[in-house]
Image (cartoon, helix red, strand yellow):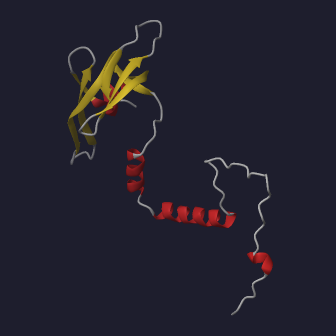
Amino acid sequence: MVKKIVEEETSQVPPTVGVQPAPVADEVVRVPRKDLERMMDRLDRLEFASSKAQLSLYDARNKTDLGTTACLNVYEGKIIVAWKLLENFVERNPQTGVWTERQTIQLHFLEGEPVEVPYAQFIRRLERKVVKRLSKTQMDNGNEIWKVVTEENGLTEPLTFEIDVRFLN
């Protein structure tokens, strides 16, 4: 099929003398609506078919700074800087059919000796305290350490210390 080329399709408008085109901001890109809709449809298809685990991994590697506050765990007035699950025993009694659990957790505090407590007791007595991040350090093993300060509440002085981000909420 042969298409007749019309002169209007091939002609260009001559630039006006003395008039400069308005500068376009770097953030603005002009794309025809049809092309934008086609790209958005393709993006929707790719997100639907993608591996959610790989998306999460990508987001974790390329995350932006989401904020500078976090919640710290406090147990019986002591700041928890680490914990370790010592015992996680779950069994079903064959005679009664009742499930029993024995979970013990070791808590490491900012000040004082580690304490072993039942996990259920730990959860019931756990409190949250807001802290503000001062700085963060990425360790060689992939862990992230935050230097934080507790918020002043009039009753206690603010504390400044370092904690592994795994033990913050």
Residue occupying the far bottom of the picture: 1
**Residue 123's spot in the image, x, y percent?**
35, 28
**Residue 146's spot in the image, x, y percent?**
35, 27
Residue occupying the far front of the picture: 17
Q: How many marks?
A: 0
- Confirm whether residue 61 shows in the render: yes
- Confirm whether residue 104 shows in the render: no
In-image side of 88 versus 124 (left or right): left
What residue appears at the point 25 percent right and 24 percent down from the top-left corner? 107
The one of 6 and 41 positioned closer to us in this rendering: 6
> In the picture, residue 11 is in which quadrant?
bottom right
What residue appears at the point 27 percent right and 34 percent down from the top-left corner? 139
The answer to whether residue 32 is above or below residue 122 is below
The one of 144 and 114 positioned closer to us in this rendering: 144
In-image side of 3 versus 162 (left or right): right
Check the picture and name the quadrant holding the N terminus. bottom right
What residue appears at the point 42 percent right and 54 percent down from the top-left corner? 55
**Residue 160's spot in the image, x, y percent?**
35, 16
Check the picture and name the quadrant holding the C terminus. top left
The one of 5 and 116 positioned closer to us in this rendering: 5
What residue appears at the point 79 percent right and 79 percent down from the top-left corner? 7
